[in-house]
Image: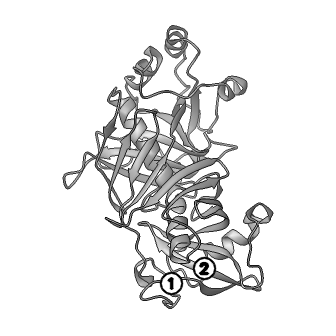
């Protein structure tokens, strides 16, 4: 794929397998001179597409699309979403080099001139005993260590590529270490997210530790207010806050994330930048959050962020170890187990449509 702006052709899965397969077969090849990134298809139809179920055999339309060979001008992808956190999934199993550059990924993620997504995720060959390797480019072209919602989409995409039904688990190599997602009978994906990192320098943050080696309810000056923050890494850095010193109870729906989010992300106390979660406590087992993601901005969901929120809530004495976390895109079930210190995240992931990026 060239560094010129890609042109995208999105092919929507139809109501019946036969009709969809026929439609895919009839799609004309793109003109070689086309360089603009353009999303085609019926917007109304896209909104009405039903989510694919891993528990049933993939349709003839899906099989026909996934088995199409890529030409030098076309990159096939499947759009997935996990609670509205959406990704362009690329089958990259034949190479350890991503088929899209960070610059091209940013163009593909553009919601006006591209396909539109929070990131591009690549399914790559496994290393060090892992079944697969996951890499992701954010919508700004940066590369995070891992993505919780993305890894659930990753697992469902693998099941579709391999035509698997029922329960399956995979060992996924990521920049945050080994992650093990398991597709369950109800179609949700449960992910062993590993152990949280609490040591300030390892997160990393320059804030001094306040509780053993952890940064818990530390003061952080942002935009003229003193916020109390707890810092957690889930392989990627998170700054969790339940409010300011002046405002003890935070109402997350009242926040202007586009104003306050970037000031946390780029704060000098976070040398690698940070994801930021703003949290409202509904009960000791029910939390509500909004997130400003590093490299993606305000998103509808963040899986690693929800894990970090539960860890922070436990450390601050605000919640139990097993919680439902409400995000703008829907709820996630999070459990920080005391016996193994691992965090387990359970939530949905669904296919939205099939497409080709053409250059």
- Tell me which residue sits at (57%, 65%) in the image: 294
Q: Who's the residue at 66% across and 68% down the image? A: 278
Residue 34 picture location, percent across and down: 59, 33
Asked if marks 1 and 2 touch (Cβ < 8 Å), the reply is: yes
Q: Nearer the viewer, residue 355 or 83?
A: 83
Vertical position of residue 139 compared to residue 185: above or below: below
- Element assignment for label 1: loop
Percent of width and height locating residue 262: 67, 71
Instruction: Say whether residue 9 is left or right of residue 334.
Output: right
Q: Position of residue 187 (x, y in %)?
A: 45, 34
| Above or below 234: residue 330 | above
Q: Residue at x 40, y 46 (%)?
A: 122
Number of numbered labels in the structure image:
2
**Label 2 sits on residue:** 229
- Badge 2 marks a residue whose secondary structure is strand
Please tell me in which quadrant of the rendered image residue 38 appears. Answer: top right
Q: Is residue 337 left or right of residue 51?
A: left
Q: Nearer the viewer, residue 170 or 2?
A: 170
Residue 242 numbered tag: none
Which residue is under mark 1? Answer: 215
Q: Residues within 10 Å of mark 2 (few under 14, many from 20)?
A: many
Name the quadrant of the N terminus.
Answer: top left
- The span from disc 1 to disc 2 (Cα, nearest Å) is 8 Å
**Crowd rating for badge 1 (residues with CA inside 10 Å; few <14, some 14–19, many 20+):** many
Q: Earlier in the sequence, mark 1 or mark 2?
A: 1
């Amino acid at each position: 794929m060239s560094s010129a702006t890609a042109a995208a052709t999105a092919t929507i899965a139809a109501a019946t397998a036969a009709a969809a397969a026929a439609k895919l077969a009839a799609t004309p090849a793109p003109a070689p001179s086309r360089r603009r990134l353009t999303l085609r298809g019926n917007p109304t139809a896209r909104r009405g597409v039903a989510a694919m179920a891993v528990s049933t055999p993939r349709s003839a339309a899906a099989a026909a699309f996934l088995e199409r060979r890529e030409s030098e001008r076309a990159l096939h992808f499947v759009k997935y979403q996990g609670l509205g956190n959406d990704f362009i999934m690329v089958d990259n199993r034949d190479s350890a080099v991503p088929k899209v550059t960070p610059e091209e990924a940013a163009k593909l993620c553009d919601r006006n001139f591209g396909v539109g997504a929070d990131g591009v995720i690549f399914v790559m060959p496994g290393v060090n005993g892992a079944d697969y390797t996951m890499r992701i480019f954010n919508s700004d072209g940066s590369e995070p260590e891992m993505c919780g919602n993305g890894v659930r989409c990753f697992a469902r995409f693998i099941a579709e590529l391999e035509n698997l039904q029922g329960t399956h688990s995979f060992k996924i190599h990521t920049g945050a270490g080994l992650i093990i997602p398991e597709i369950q009978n109800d179609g949700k994906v449960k992910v062993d997210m590993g152990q949280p990192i609490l040591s300030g320098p390892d997160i990393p943050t320059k804030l001094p530790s306040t509780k053993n080696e952890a940064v818990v309810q530390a003061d952080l000056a942002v935009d003229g207010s003193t916020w109390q923050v707890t810092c957690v890494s889930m392989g990627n850095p998170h700054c969790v806050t339940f409010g300011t010193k002046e405002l003890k109870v935070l109402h997350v729906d009242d926040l202007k994330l586009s104003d306050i989010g970037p000031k946390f992300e780029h704060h000098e106390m976070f040398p690698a930048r940070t994801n930021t979660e703003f949290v409202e406590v509904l009960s000791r087992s029910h939390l509500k959050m909004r997130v400003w993601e590093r490299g993606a901005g305000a998103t509808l969901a963040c899986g690693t962020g929800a894990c970090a929120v539960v860890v922070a809530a436990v450390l601050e004495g605000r919640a139990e170890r097993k919680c439902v976390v409400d995000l703008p895109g829907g709820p996630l079930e999070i459990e920080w187990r005391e016996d193994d210190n691992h965090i387990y995240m359970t939530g949905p992931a669904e296919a939205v449509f099939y497409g080709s990026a053409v250059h």
